[in-house]
Image (cartoon, helix red, strand yellow):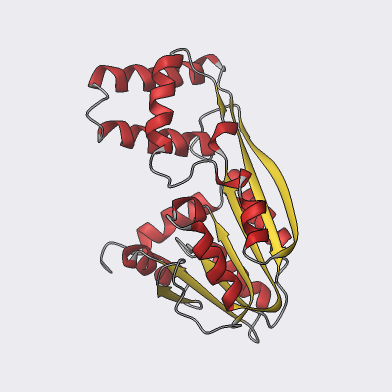
């Protein structure tokens, strides 16, 4: 595993992190979280560790950031990229931390994968100090507007794409769930990921890659359908006709 997550893999992750869409997402998440020097912060679903690294810079030497992720493989990558942060394998639905351990808990695109969101919110509430805060960034995939010229095929592709999530529409229920978990002063903000092209730096290109991988592994999509869907998007790119728009939501609350 350590041989795979080497300097080349780290460089690839760094390039992706510097793309405009990913920088915008982290910036919006960071703005709402508003970390302070000396704070202890938990990131759920810490992934490649780049947001945790930025958090560590904000809390300084007097603070502490812990990243939690269920995948040991991803944690190895995060440790390679961000050695100054403690990364722990664990489940957001059963946090391995004492009560009232953290000033803030953050999570981006992680709660949508959980089978028991309410339990995870209860666990988040438990590990927060009184006055602590939670900030969750997630997506409602019904907000996607993606130009295509094969609507029936696109609908099937997106159904398969959304099936990887436990809840592909989570933001619409999160305010109520946060309240039920005991959080107060709940706020909801949104921003739009808008791409007019399929450059390597765009979230649209990243989504295309995921969708293509899903189709390749799904027997209900023929090779011809896969090629037709991909060619449609590439032709729109050549014609200057790409349109990809998706809402991101940031929800926050206080203990």
Name which quarter of the figure residue 133 lies in: bottom right
| Residue 230 visible at all | yes
Q: Which residue is drawn at 61% across and 56% down?
A: 177
Q: Position of residue 52 (x, y in %)?
A: 55, 68
Tally the numbered discs.
0
Give residue 232's position: percent from left, percent from top.
Answer: 42, 16
| Residue at 58%, 76% in the rendered image | 126
Q: Relative to residue 64, is residue 175 drawn left or right? A: right
Query: Along the line of sight, which residue is nearer the eye, 1 or 222?
Result: 222
**Residue shown at 59% from the left, 64% from the top:** 106
> Which x, y percent locates residue 166?
43, 47
Position in image of residue 21 (x %, y %): 59, 44
State the quadrant of the C terminus: bottom right
Name of the residue lying farthest toward the front:
180
Relative vertical location of residue 91 with respect to residue 140 in this rendering, above or below: below
127 versus 251 height, above or below: below
Specify the quadrant of the image occupied by residue 134.
bottom right
Residue placed farthest to the bottom in the image?
62
Q: In this view, does 10 lie to the left or right of 29?
A: left
The relative height of residue 16 versus residue 34 in the rendered view (above or below) is: above
Identify the residue at image location x=60%, y=26%. Answer: 196
Q: Quadrant of the N terminus?
A: bottom left
């Amino acid at each position: 595993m350590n041989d795979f997550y080497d300097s080349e893999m780290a460089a690839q992750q760094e390039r992706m992190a510097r793309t405009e869409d990913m920088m915008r997402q982290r910036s919006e998440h960071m703005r709402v979280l508003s970390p302070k020097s000396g704070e202890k912060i938990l990131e759920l679903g810490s992934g490649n560790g780049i947001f945790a690294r930025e958090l560590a810079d904000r809390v300084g030497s007097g603070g502490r950031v812990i990243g939690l992720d269920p995948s040991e493989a991803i944690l190895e990558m995060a440790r390679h990229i961000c050695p100054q942060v403690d990364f722990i394998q664990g489940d957001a639905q059963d946090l391995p931390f004492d009560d009232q351990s953290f000033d803030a808990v953050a999570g981006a695109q992680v709660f949508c994968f959980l089978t028991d969101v309410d339990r995870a919110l209860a666990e988040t509430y438990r590990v927060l100090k009184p006055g602590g805060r939670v900030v969750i960034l997630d997506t409602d995939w019904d907000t996607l507007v993606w130009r295509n010229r094969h609507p029936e095929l696109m609908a099937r592709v997106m159904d398969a794409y959304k099936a990887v999530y436990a809840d592909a529409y989570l933001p619409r229920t999160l305010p109520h769930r946060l309240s039920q978990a005991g959080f107060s002063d709940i706020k909801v903000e949104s921003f739009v990921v808008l791409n007019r092209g399929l450059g390597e730096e765009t979230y649209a290109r990243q989504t295309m890659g995921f969708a293509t991988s899903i189709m390749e592994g799904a027997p209900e999509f023929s090779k011809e359908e896969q090629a037709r869907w991909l060619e449609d998007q590439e032709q729109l790119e050549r014609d200057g006709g790409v349109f990809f728009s998706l809402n991101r939501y940031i929800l926050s609350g206080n203990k």
